[in-house]
C-alpha cells in the first residue's frame, strides 16, 4: 500500500468522485507512487494498457530496476480494490469487463486476514452472447447467468504459465484476459495477490470462424499454490463443475487428500521431465485410486504450445457438451458463508440499500408511476418549482456579492440512436451512462465533473458538465406523427443552454460513431 501511496485509503476508501476529477497526467507514471493513479484513470477510460505497471524510471535505456522499484500488476489491482469503496468497486468491475480483463471474484486481504466474495461489485455487469449464427442475442446480469464454471489451480511450482495457457484457450486473438509472467512486470514476485481468485467469462458470438467454444461458461483461476489457500480451494471444489490441476513435479501422496470431497470432475495436467513422468503418474494414479478419486490425466508430453492448447480445448468442449449442471454467482453465496468468506453484499450499507430499492420497486409495481411520484415524491411538483424560483433569487445575490458564477464547460453529445454516443462519453471521461443494444437512453442525463485546481486556469473553467441525450430517429418512435418534432425539440434543448459557459454539440454520422 505504501509503495503505491494507497495506505491512507485502506481505511478511508477512494470514492468514484475522486477518480472522476479531471487532472493533468503524463502518458506514463513517472514513479512507482503514481502507478495506482494511472491505473485508475486509464481503467475508467477502458484503456487496455491500464494494467501496465512500468514507470518512467524503468523506461530509461540504462535503467536496471530491482524488484523493489517495480510491482506486479496483480498486486496493484488487489491493492486498488481493497482501497476502493463499494460503489467504485462496481465501476472498476464494469470497466475491467469492458476491457475483457479477468475480474477479482475472491479478494484476499492479508492485512485483515479475510477473503471477500465480490458479488455486489459485479452486480452492474451485463453480458450478452449468441449461441447460434441466426439466433437472437441473449443478455443477462453476470451474477444471474446459469453456466458451467471451470476452475484452474496449480499444486507446487509450475514451469508452464497457467494464466498464459488460459489466455490461449479462451481466444485465438492473443488477448490477455489474465495477467501472466511474460507480461510487463508479470514476473515480479507477488506481495498481496496470492490467494486471489479471478473470473473470466467466455461469451460466444454465434460465428463458427471466431468462437472457440459454442456455449457460455466461466473460468475461475486461483493465484498461487493451492496448498497455501485451502479456503479458496474448498470454495472452488464446491462451486466448480470441472477442475483442472497443473502439476509440474513429483508430489507426495500426503498432498493428494486436498482434492477429496470435490463435486467437480477432476483433470490433472502433467508437465514433467520425460524420465520421471511414468513413475510420478503411477504415484498419482495409485494415490487417487485409494482416495476413490478418478481424474482424467492429461500429459503435455512433446506437444508444443499450440498443439497443447488445441488438446485442452478438446477436453473442455467435450466436458461442456456432457454437463447439464449449471451454477450462478448468486448461488455461491451459501458456500461462501459456510467457509466464513466475507460477502460484500451482506455488509450493512449494501443490505440496507437493497431493502430500500426492493420496497420502492414493490410500491411502483402495485400502483401507477404518476400516482407513486405524486404520493412519494411531492417535492418534485409545485414545491420543487417554488424552490427553484427561490434558489434563482438567492443565486443572484451570491453573484452580486462574490462576482460571478463558477465557470461551466457544457459538452453535449447528439446523434442517431445506437451509434455509440453513451459509449463515447464513458470512454472519454470514465463515466457510467447506460449502454446496451437498442434504445437505452431516454431524455437527457448529465454528470458534473470537477476539475483539479491546477487545470482550472488552463482550461478556463471550474467544472465540466457532460450531457448524454436520447438518440435521434428512434425506430420505436418512427410511427408517431410527431417524431420529427420530438427530435427537433431534443436537438434544440441540447444546443441552447443559457447557463452554460460554453456548449459544444457533436452531431456525429452513424457510420463514424459505429466505428468508434
Image: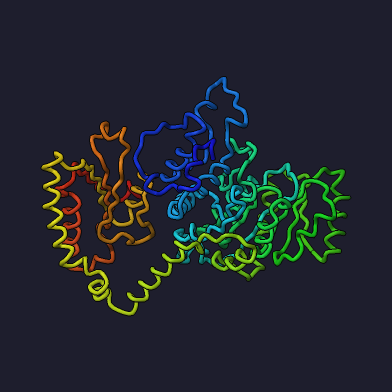
- Give the camera-side residue of 515 and 51: 51
Q: Residue at x 25, y 40 (%)?
A: 462
**Circle count:** 0
Q: Is residue 122 left or right of residue 199?
A: left
Percent position (x, y) of residue 376? Answer: 27, 72
Percent position (x, y) of residue 416? Answer: 27, 54
Q: Residue at x 53, y 33 (%)?
A: 54
- Give the camera-side residue of 163 and 481: 163
On the question of residue 315 being in view, the answer is no
On the question of residue 372 being in view, the answer is yes
Percent position (x, y) of residue 337? Answer: 60, 65
- Give the camera-side residue of 21 and 514: 21
Q: Is residue 214 above or below residue 47?
A: below
Q: By what rule are the colours in the image chosen?
A: rainbow
Q: Is residue 427 left or right of residue 99?
A: left
Residue 368 quadrant = bottom left
Q: Is residue 35 above or below residue 354?
A: above
Q: Residue at x 56, y 41 (%)?
A: 73
- Give the camera-side residue of 83 and 419: 83
Q: Is residue 450 left or right of residue 137?
A: left
Amino acid at each position: 500500500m505504501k509503495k503505491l501511496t494507497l495506505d491512507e485509503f485502506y481505511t478511508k476508501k477512494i470514492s468514484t468522485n475522486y477518480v472522476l476529477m479531471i487532472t493533468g497526467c503524463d502518458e506514463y507514471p513517472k514513479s512507482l507512487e503514481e502507478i495506482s493513479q494511472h491505473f485508475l484513470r486509464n481503467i475508467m477510460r477502458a484503456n487496455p494498457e491500464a494494467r501496465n505497471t512500468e514507470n518512467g524510471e524503468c523506461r530509461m535505456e540504462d535503467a536496471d530496476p530491482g524488484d523493489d522499484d517495480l510491482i506486479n500488476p496483480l498486486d496493484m489491482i488487489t491493492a486498488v480494490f481493497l482501497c476502493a469503496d463499494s460503489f467504485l468497486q462496481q465501476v472498476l468491475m464494469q470497466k475491467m469487463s469492458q476491457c475483457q480483463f479477468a475480474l477479482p471474484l475472491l479478494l484476499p486481504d492479508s492485512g485483515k486476514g479475510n477473503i471477500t466474495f465480490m458479488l455486489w461489485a459485479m452486480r452492474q455487469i451485463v453480458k450478452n452472447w449468441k449461441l447460434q449464427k441466426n439466433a437472437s442475442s441473449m443478455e443477462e446480469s453476470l451474477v444471474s447467468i446459469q453456466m458451467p464454471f471451470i476452475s484452474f489451480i496449480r499444486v507446487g511450482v509450475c514451469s508452464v504459465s497457467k494464466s498464459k495457457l488460459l489466455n490461449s484457450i479462451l481466444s485465438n486473438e492473443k488477448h490477455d484476459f489474465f495477467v501472466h509472467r511474460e507480461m510487463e512486470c508479470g514476473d515480479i514476485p507477488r506481495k498481496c495477490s496470492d490467494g486471489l481468485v479471478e473470473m473470466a467469462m467466455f461469451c460466444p458470438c454465434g460465428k463458427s470462424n471466431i468462437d472457440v467454444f459454442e456455449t457460455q461458461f466461466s473460468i475461475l483461476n486461483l493465484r498461487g499454490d493451492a496448498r497455501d489457500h485451502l479456503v479458496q480451494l474448498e470454495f472452488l471444489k464446491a462451486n466448480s463443475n470441472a477442475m483442472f490441476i497443473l502439476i509440474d513435479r513429483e508430489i507426495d501422496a500426503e498432498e493428494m487428500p486436498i482434492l477429496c470431497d470435490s463435486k467437480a470432475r477432476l483433470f490433472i495436467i502433467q508437465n514433467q521431465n520425460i524420465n520421471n513422468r511414468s513413475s510420478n503418474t503411477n504415484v498419482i494414479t495409485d494415490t487417487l485410486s485409494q482416495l476413490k478419486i478418478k481424474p482424467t490425466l492429461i500429459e503435455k508430453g512433446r506437444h508444443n504450445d499450440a498443439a497443447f492448447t488445441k488438446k485442452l480445448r478438446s477436453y473442455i468442449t467435450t466436458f461442456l457438451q456432457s454437463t447439464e449442471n449449471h451454477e450462478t454467482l448468486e448461488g455461491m453465496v451459501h458456500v461462501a458463508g459456510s467457509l466464513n468468506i466475507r460477502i460484500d453484499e451482506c455488509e450493512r450499507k449494501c443490505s440496507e440499500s437493497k431493502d430500500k430499492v426492493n420496497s420502492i420497486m414493490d410500491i411502483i409495481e402495485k400502483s401507477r408511476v404518476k400516482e407513486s411520484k405524486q404520493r412519494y415524491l411531492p417535492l418534485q411538483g409545485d414545491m420543487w418549482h417554488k424552490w427553484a424560483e427561490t434558489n434563482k433569487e438567492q443565486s443572484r445575490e451570491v453573484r452580486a456579492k462574490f462576482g460571478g458564477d463558477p465557470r461551466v464547460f457544457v459538452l453535449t453529445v447528439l446523434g442517431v440512436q445506437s451509434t455509440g454516443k453513451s459509449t463515447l462519453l464513458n470512454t472519454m471521461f470514465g463515466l457510467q451512462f447506460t449502454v446496451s443494444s437498442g434504445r437505452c437512453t431516454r431524455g437527457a442525463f448529465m454528470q458534473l465533473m470537477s476539475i483539479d485546481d491546477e487545470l482550472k486556469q488552463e482550461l478556463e473553467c471550474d467544472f465540466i458538465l457532460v450531457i448524454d441525450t436520447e438518440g435521434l430517429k428512434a425506430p420505436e418512435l418512427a410511427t408517431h406523427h410527431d417524431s420529427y418534432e420530438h427530435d427537433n425539440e431534443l436537438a434544440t434543448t441540447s444546443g441552447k443552454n443559457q447557463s452554460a459557459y460554453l456548449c459544444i454539440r457533436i452531431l456525429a454520422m452513424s457510420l463514424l460513431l459505429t466505428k468508434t
